Image (tube, rainbow, N blue to C red):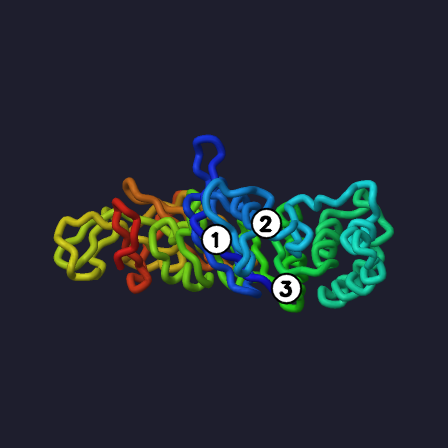
Amino acid sequence: MTGITLENVSKYFGEQCVIDQMNLRIPDGTVLVLVGPSGSGKTTLLRIMAGLLQPDRGKVYYGQTPLEEIERVQRNIGMVFQTDALVPHWSAGENVGFWSRLRRREHEVPERVRRVSQITGIGIEHLMERFPRQLSGGEKQRVAIARALARDLNILFFDEPFANLDPAMRGQARLELKRLLSTFKVTAVYVTHDQTEAVMLASRIAVIDKGQIVQMGSFRDLYERPINQFIASFIGFPTMNFFKGQIEDGQWYGETFGGLRIRKDLDNGTIVTMGIRPQDIYLEHGGVPAVVDMVTPYYAEHFQLLSVWLGSECWQMIAPLDMRISTGETVYCGINSENAMYFDTQTGIRIG
């Protein structure tokens, strides 16, 4: 295994700074998942770490050695792309065994394929004679992952490998990959938009925005202890609601909700944004009235998501799936104030 270190890495595309003086250390054997909004720099960062892009400033290290000082054939990395990137006129077996053939180690390929099949519980030996055009999307990605593992590996990179699979296949593919990463102990970096995928696969999750890592930790850390409003809004589903208000005598008051206790060192009149997740807004007899704008059932999760409004404010809340609620109906809302979070309205930094 090999750890990865970035020191003051920056990357520009023309005048645009895509990666901004990034420092990062990924210990040996860590599975780091990179998440962030579109255009945040996730894939660019992955490609810099893999040596496919050169940083304009800073250095990337594998272990203690600068990446540029390691010959490409000695880097021992594998990469799985969003598209399978299989050679179309080679069979699956030829794609998987290419690295071994170059080193006259073709005899190792069948055992590696058998091992991958054994770990995932999904046999792929029968795919080896087929060409990519004869494979489904899920089969192509299984072959691409087998190709990455059918070599001497220190580091494995994944760039949204399951983004093009249907939901059922994606769930199965995650499970298979989790088994593989638990068995093949390598340092892995994984880019995804899917937070379920991140939770399932990651040792740690790094949230990127505007070319910088905003916060890194477990999903629970990010969900329960976001450092700013961006992390609070990005992590978790359904997304957090935000209400602007101000402080009066150690309490927060907004247009709709108010009288919520907050830290006492804030001056009266301080403008503060309160965040509360839909799970912490509930139906309460005699609570704040709101008009239902939309009802979205989530059958697998056993709840319905209500979009409601009152005055100039709108928010989302959870209701039991078996409760009959219609658009245009008035419902009454209470909040679990103990789970409210507070953010500086100007900077977005969490203050309580």
Q: Position of residue 295 (x, y in %)?
A: 46, 48
Q: How far separated are the C-alphas under marks 2 and 3?
A: 18 Å
State which quadrant residue 168 falls in.
Answer: bottom right
Is 20 located above or below residue 284 in the figure? above
Q: Which residue is located at x 25 percent, y 52 percent?
A: 257
In this orientation, which residue lies closer to the viewer: 102 or 81?
102
Q: Which residue is located at x 57 percent, y 65 percent?
A: 29
Q: Are marks 2 and 1 in contact (CB under 8 Å)?
A: no
**Residue 168 visible (yes or no):** no
Residue linked to disc 1: 6
Sequence order check, earlier mark of 2 and 1: 1
Dot 1: element: strand
Q: Amino acid at mark 2?
A: Ala
Q: Position of residue 164 (x, y in %)?
A: 65, 45
Q: Residues within 10 Å of mark 1 (few under 14, many from 20)?
A: many
Q: Residues within 10 Å of mark 2 (few under 14, many from 20)?
A: many
Q: Amino acid at mark 3?
A: Leu
In this orientation, which residue lies closer to the viewer: 332 or 157?
157
State which quadrant residue 267 falls in.
Answer: bottom left
Report the mark closest to the observer, 2 or 3: 2
Dot 3: element: helix
Q: How far separated are the C-alphas under marks 1 and 3?
A: 23 Å
Q: Position of residue 59 (x, y in %)?
A: 49, 49
Sequence order check, earlier mark of 2 and 3: 2
Q: Amino acid at mark 1?
A: Leu
Q: Is residue 239 left or right of residue 92?
A: left
Sequence order check, earlier mark of 1 and 3: 1
Residue linked to disc 2: 50
Q: Which residue is located at x 49 percent, y 34 percent?
A: 13
Q: Is residue 144 left or right of residue 159?
A: right
Residue linked to disc 3: 181
